Image: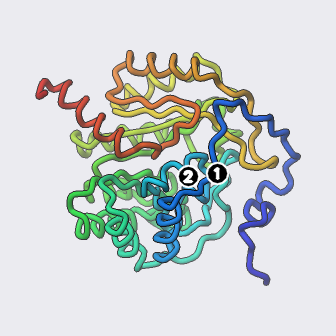
Amino acid sequence: MALRDLRIPDQRHPEKAHRPDQAQPKKPGWIRVKAPTSEGYKRTRDIMKDNRLSTVCEEAGCPNVGECWSQGHATMMIMGEICTRGCTFCNVATGKPNALDVFEPGRVAHAVHKLGLKHVVITSVDRDDLDDGGAEHFAQTIRAIRHRSPDSTIEVLTPDFLKSKPGALEIVVEARPDVFNHNLETVPALYPTVRPGARYFHSLRLLQKVKELDPAMFTKSGIMVGLGEDRGSVLQVMDDMRAADIDFMTIGQYLQPTPKHHRVDRFVTPEEFAGYEKAAFGKGFLMVSATPLTRSSYHAGDDFARLRQARLQKLGRV
C-alpha cells in the first residue's frame, strides 16, 4: 500500500473527501497577515526541523506563524502529526497514528533550551488508540523540559482523554505544568457538526477536575466564533467556564482551512470581540484574549505573566 502524502488534502483528510465543497468567503482586512520571511522565523523553523518536531503552528495552518516564529515562539505538537479524531474545523491530518517516539520528550526539551523559551506551550493530536490517551507522554515531556530548562514555565494544551483509562488526567496534573489548557472549541449546540468525537460537558468537567486536583494550577480554555453560534450561546459558555473555575479564556475567529472543512458562517468584527472581552472580564476571568487572530497559544508567554499578576492582585499580594 502506498504511503499517504499529507500535503494532499484528500489524503490528509480522508474522512472529509466525500463532503461537498463549502464556499470560502473573502477575508476582511482585519484578518490578513503578512507571509513569514524573517530570519527569526527561519531559525525557529530550522530548529524544529533539526529536532524532527511537529508544531501545531504548521499543522493547523495558524495565521500567526510568521509573527510568533520570528520571536522564537513555537507550539510543539507531540505524539505525531496524525489525529484519531476528525473535527470538521481542524486542519491536522486524520487517520491511524504511528507508534509513540520515546525520544521525543528529550528532543522537545532540547529545542526549548536552544530557543531559550521562557514559556513553552505543548499540545498534541488526539490519541484515542492509546490506553492513557498519551497522558504519560505529556508527563515525560514536562519532566524533560523541567530538567533541561528549570526556569521555563510550561503550558499544556491537552486532548479530552474521553476514551482513556481512569487516571489519565491525574498523570498530567501530577507532572505540574504551570497552565493546563483544554479547548471547548465551540458552543454545545454545534458539537455534533463541529466536534463530533467530543462531548462538551466532558471537556468542561475535565477542566473543573484539574482545579480539584491542584487548586493552584492555572486553567485555560478557548472557543472559536464565526461557526454559526450566537452571542447568547457564547455568553453561556463563559458562565459554564466560570462555574468550572477556569482562569483564562481565549476567543478567536474561525478560519476555514479548505473547502471540505466546516464553512465560515461570518467574520466577527473587532468591535464584537472587544464586547466579548469586556463581558468575560466582567464574569470574573483573570485573563481574557478575544481578537480575530487570537489562538490558544498566541502571545502565551506575555499572557501568562498577566495571568499570574492578576491572581496576585486578586489575592491582595501586589
Amino acid type at circle 2 is: Gly
- Residue 267 point in image, percent of width and height: 69, 28
Q: Residue at x 80, y 35 (%)?
A: 25
Name the side, left or right, on which 99 lies relative to 278.
right
Q: Is residue 194 visible?
A: yes
Query: Secondary structure under badge 2?
Result: helix
Which residue is situated farthest in the bottom direction here? 1
**Residue 35: which disc?**
1
Q: Earlier in the sequence, mark 2 or mark 1?
A: 1
Q: Is residue 16 left or right of residue 65?
A: right
Residue pointed to by mark 2: 66
Are the residues at dot 2 and dot 1 in contact (C-beta closer than 8 Å)?
yes
Of 313 and 221, the residue lying toward us = 313
Q: Residue at x 73, y 34 (%)?
A: 27
**Rendered location of residue 271, percent (x, y):** 57, 18
Residue 106 at what x, y percent from top left? 35, 75
In the image, residue 170 sits, relative to residue 317, either above or below, namely below
